[in-house]
Image (spheres, grey):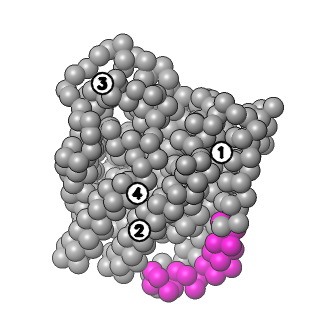
Amino acid sequence: MGYFKKTLQGLSWSLGLRFIIRGFAVIRTIILARILLPEQFGAYGVATVTLAFLEMFTETGINVFLIQEKELSKYLDTAWVASILRGLIIGAIIVISAPFIASFFRSPQSLQLLQLISLVAVIRGLVNPAEVKFQKDLLFHKEFMFRGVVLFIEAAIAISLALILRSPLSLALSLIISAICEVIISLTFIHPLPRFKFTLDKFAQILRQGKWVTAAGIFNYLYHNADNIVIGRLLGVSSLGLYDISYKISSLPITEISEVFGRVTFPVYTQISSDTSRLRAAFIKVMISITAITLPLSMILFFFPTQIISLFLGPNWLSAAPVLRLLSIYGFIRGISGSTSALFLSIGKNQYVTLVTLVSVLGLAVSIVPLVLKFGLSGAAISVIIGSVAALPVMAYFVRKTFV
């Protein structure tokens, strides 16, 4: 089967998977938004932002490395042990720092959520790294089933517990249970199974290859979460809850499409990376397809934010409409620019991804605080747009350099 056919087949399964994943996410968000208040979402947001920060800061680039390497089993044991140790370290750091983080955000409710979220990092560390085979070997139909089961469990538990508890604890508990299910499924049905065996030189090789992925992960985290941190600190967790929901609504339908293309095209690009003309043709087709899909979605979000929020989330969230309109612009830019990461990674230019993300972070960093102080939540949305636009010339330069 040709690579274009494999790409189309992979896109079909991945789009189906993302449809189910985001279907669960949207339904869960709609239901929970009518059960929980913005400040409760904000308190949970503090916990997830903390977890995401530590996961990104300790990212070793293992998954990217395993996809790039031909002999996955050669590094599987070391990758698993490293993942376990990483999870334990993240969990310990969250538990120790939880009182300080809750105090920083002036959110006592976040303390218990942080303590629960620490378990998620520990549990996720036990997941079998061989699950990257789904992407590496273009087995997207199997990933469809694997992820679909895990996300269904998470959504069902979150909604059920929210109806009973009427508390953001339901979100944290559902995340823990879904992480346990992912570990069990990955160690039961995905082969080869890893052994608790660590080789220092192999780990060093992973780190050398993954250093740019680690740096890109840190910058990516800062770009996508610095606004949340500033809002939570300056405007409070209620505003954070409003902004977080607006961010998800604006970015989910658009950036998820981009991520689907990225997941599918990364291994395909990798296999044709030595043929520049073929790689260029594939990249152009992907960019045209992403633009054709994401532009109409962005326009709907831009012109009808009040109607969308009123229909799906209810009156408690209507104040987020202006933010949703601005973030729809960001979502479109991110959807287009994000698709280039797969291209850069496929040719081993991990540093390109890092540098593009760094420029985005700098654009956000210099504007976020003054804009939030002057315009509130809308200022945060504007600063995110500034960061995404600032990176476009750098991204275009590296794309051109790839094909010259």
Task: Answer with mark 4 or mark 3, whichever residue precedes in sequence.
Answer: 3
Q: Quadrant of the C terminus?
A: top right
Viewer-nearest residue: 168 or 396: 396
Which residue is disc 4 drawn over?
A: 141
Q: Amino acid at mark 1?
A: Thr
Which residue is disc 2 drawn over?
A: 20
Q: Residue sitting at 34 percent across and 25 percent down?
A: 75
Q: Residues within 10 Å of mark 1 (few under 14, many from 20)?
A: many
The span picked out in magenta is 294-314
Label of residue 340 in the image: 1
Q: Amino acid at mark 2?
A: Ile
Task: Answer with mark 2 or mark 4, whichever residue precedes in sequence.
Answer: 2
Q: Position of residue 266 (x, y in %)?
A: 56, 43
Q: Residues within 10 Å of mark 2 (few under 14, many from 20)?
A: some
Q: Residue sitting at 69 percent across and 48 percent down?
A: 282
Determine the CA span between mark 2 and mark 4: 13 Å
Task: Answer with mark 1 or mark 4, whichever residue precedes in sequence.
Answer: 4
Task: Answer with mark 2 or mark 1, whichever residue precedes in sequence.
Answer: 2
Residue at the farthest top position:
201
Which residue is disc 3 drawn over?
A: 78
Task: Work out whether residue 247 can be spotted.
Answer: no
Q: Residue sitting at 28 percent across and 31 percent down?
A: 80
Task: Work out whether residue 200 can be spotted.
Answer: yes
Determine the CA span between mark 3 and mark 1: 30 Å
Q: Secondary structure at mark 4?
A: helix
